[in-house]
Structure formats: structure tokens, C-alpha cells
Amino acid sequence: MLRRFWDSDPESSSEMTAEDLLIARLFFQPYAEYLADYSEWTLPHGTPNICPLCGGKPLVGVLRPEGDGAKRLLTCFLCAMEWDYRRLVCPSCGEEDVKKLAVYQAKEFPAVRVEACDTCRSYIKTVDMTKEGHAIPVIDELATIPLNLWAAEHDFHKLQTNVLGI
């Protein structure tokens, strides 16, 4: 099971149960983070929609202060590496039409937003560090499960599930 997870895309493996995926992710995540911290890599050209180090999908987006605004980064679900990604592009299908890229927010979670794509019906949650500088994106992604429920009710699917499978 662990070899199947490490050698392939675990989200596309119909042979693995939700429990197997959880166990494998919890087992490999610290190792993947270690490799990300201590591996040499070069910044890829453009803005890839998968992790340039391990090939994982992004779990959460992050808006970090830069100049008078913020730059968008994506955080890998497995190794937790962050990489730059253009703000007005869907990380799932590459849609660039701003009319098809909606942003939804709830007053209960002012620093977290749902960035949805009407083309592929996917979404990713993004933590705005310009609003909450002490936020921890991976934790805030987990703490805002009501946003996932809202997105599912509106027929959006999450780009990458978290460790809880949500």
C-alpha cells in the first residue's frame, strides 16, 4: 500500500481505501517535508499547477504580503513546499477568464476564501496572510470545513483533499 502511494498518484488509485490513503499520507508527509527542506531544486519556468519538487497537488493557496499588495503561492499537500502561482489562474485547469474565476468569503472566516472555477468546477481555499499574519495556512484550511461544505453544496469539488479526506 505504501509503495503504491509513493510511486503513483494516490488520488487516482481506486484500489486504495480512504483509510489506506490517510495512513500513507500521515506516514510519508514528515519524510516528504524533510526532503523538501533539504533537497536542491531549481525554480521551474512559468507557474506549474503541481509541486515542482514532488509533483503533488496543491492543498491550499496563500496570499503573502508583497509590495503594496500580495502574491499568491500554492502549498503542496504532501511536502508542504510553497511555490509562486499567478493570482488569476485556476490551478486545476488553467482557466484565465476572470469572469469564470469566482472568489467567495464568509464573514466567519475573514482571512480564508474559496477560489472557484466555473469551467472545471474545482476550488481551492486560500489564506490571506495580509489579513491575518499569524495564520497557519494548512491549519486554517482544516479549521474552515464549513467552507468545504458550502462549496460541495454549490457543486464544486476540491482540487486536493486534506488529511481528513475533505
Image (tube, grey):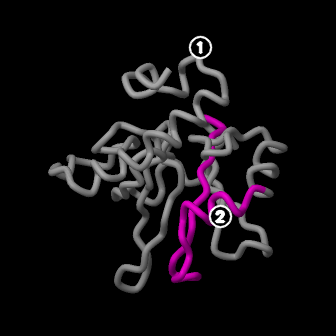
Q: Relative to residue 106, is residue 159 depicted above or below? A: above
Magenta stretch in the rendered image? 120-145
Q: Residue at x 41, y 61 (%)?
A: 73
Q: On the rendered structure, is 17 left or right of 50?
A: right
Q: Quadrant of residue 111?
A: bottom right
Which of discs 1 and 2 lies nearer the camera? The answer is: 1
Q: Earlier in the sequence, mark 1 or mark 2?
A: 1
Query: Looking at this view, is 61 or 143 the one in front?
Result: 143
Residue 127, given in percent of the width and then of the height, sits at 57, 67
Residue drawn where x is 19% and y is 50% of the image: 39
- Given residues 123 and 3, the one toward you in this image is 3
Residue at x-position 67% and y-position 29%? 18
Q: Residue furthest bottom?
A: 68
Return the residue at label 1: 15
Q: Quadrant of the C terminus?
A: top right
Badge 2: residue crowd in 10 Å (few <14, some 14–19, many ≥20): many
Inter-mark Cα distance, 1 to 2: 33 Å
Residue 98: name its quadrant. bottom right
What type is the residue that disc 1 sits on?
Glu
Is 63 drawn above or below residue 42 in the view shown? Answer: below
**Mark 1 falls on what kind of element?**
loop
**Residue furthest top in the image:** 15
- Give x and y (percent) for residue 10: 50, 26
| Residue 124 rendering spot, x and y as whole percentages | 59, 51
In depth, the one of 15 and 90 nearer the eye is 15
> What residue is disc 2 on?
113
Does the magenta-highlighted stretch encompass residue 141?
A: yes
Looking at the picture, which amino acid does disc 2 mark? Arg
Residue drawn at (65%, 55%), measured in percent from left and top? 102
